[in-house]
Amino acid sequence: MSMAGMSATVDTSAVEVLPHCPYHAQIDAWRAFRDEFLETQGLVDMQEFEVRKNILSREKAVAIEELIYREDTKMLIDGAKRMINVLADYFQLYSTIYHSNNWSIEFDRLKHTNWMQFGMEIYTTYGTAMQLWKDAQYAAAGKAVADGLFPTVQEKSGNVAWDPLPYNKPYPGEEVAGYVDGMIYQFTLKHNTDNLASCLSEQDELLGMFEGAAESLMKRYNADVIEGVAELNSVYASLGDYVKGCSKDTIDQIAAVQERVNVVEEDIILANLEVSKKHVELTYAFMKMEAAQHDFSSYGQNLAEYYLTVTGN
């Protein structure tokens, strides 16, 4: 549901349009610490748990946004259904991890910790971690803490039979093909039937361009949103060079996309962002969920939706 037609005029030097979490650095450090700790301690069940919990947390966020913003009745109903399903899945997930032997294994290791040695490891790790923190390398600081306090790599352990994840390991070209496929549909409302994973050229380069644009948009600051839109302009405008090996239908679809791609003034981008904040927040939530689910086509579609919303193209 696009809101791209709404626009006004704002000062690009005005206050930030979107709110920001003040604890991103701490969150990045914690996640890096957690992931490194679970990996070096060989806690396989805990790792499987965290992957599934991340997917559920993203689904929960979408459900909350749908219930709050409810752009139409269908969205309200979808949000309620999604929330009910997520709560049931949370119960099942925590019931499953409760029976893991990882709890007792790690508790036993902690009981046999040499606390004198552990204190010395804290002392030596502190300086390294703080220097990385001062250098704004927050994830590296979290990883350094995990490696410094728990230097012994343990054998893998786990006794839970986990259900399969909702996705398979991506095959070569699947991710960038999904981004292009979703983008084509969002711009043209027509599905692409080509095997984009095999016909797109310079796939690593193209994927990096998509990821760079999305990363800029995810930072949420005015300047980063403007930069992300500019990067998407560049990606969309150059797609013709990457589909030369695809079918005529795909080439024609890309040409139709490029007819709607134009450079937009910064104040118009921020004005559209201002009047479409609720819709943009919902789009962010969907993109994060789709990234966790490896739903690359839907991610590409919502990335294009974001672009169309804030540019009015």
Image: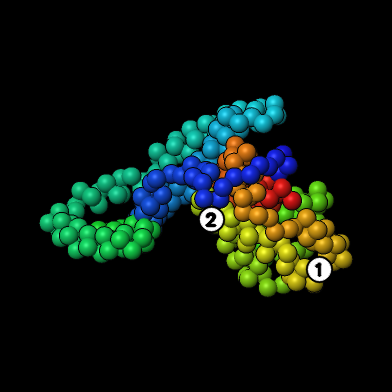
Residue behind mark 1:
246
Q: CA distance from mark 2 to mark 1?
A: 33 Å
Q: Nearer the viewer, residue 180 or 14?
A: 14
Can you see residue 28?
yes
Give coordinates of residue 294: x percent, y percent: 61, 53
Find out whether the residues at labels 2 and 1 contact each other: C-beta distance under 8 Å.
no
Between discs 2 and 1, the one toward the N terminus? 2
Kind of residue sitting beneath label 2: Asp
Looking at the image, which residue is at 66% across and 27% down?
Answer: 77
Q: How many numbered marks are there? A: 2
| 299 over 129 or under it: above or below | above
Give coordinates of residue 65: x percent, y percent: 57, 34
Kind of residue sitting beneath label 1: Cys
> For the residues carrying marks 2 and 1, which lies nearer the camera in this image?
2
* Residue 224 marker: 2
Q: Nearer the viewer, residue 276 or 285?
A: 276
Residue at the far right: name it.
248
Label 2 crowd (10 A; few <14 / some 14-19 / many >=20) = some
Q: Quadrant of residue 62?
A: top right
Badge 2 marks a residue whose secondary structure is helix
* Residue 285 marker: none
Residue 35 horizontal side relative to residue 76, left or right: left
Can you see residue 85?
no
Label 1 crowd (10 A; few <14 / some 14-19 / many >=20) = some
| 176 over 83 or under it: above or below | below
Residue 117 horizontal side relative to residue 249, left or right: left
Give coordinates of residue 113: x percent, y percent: 19, 53
Looking at the image, which residue is at 59% across and 45% down?
Answer: 10
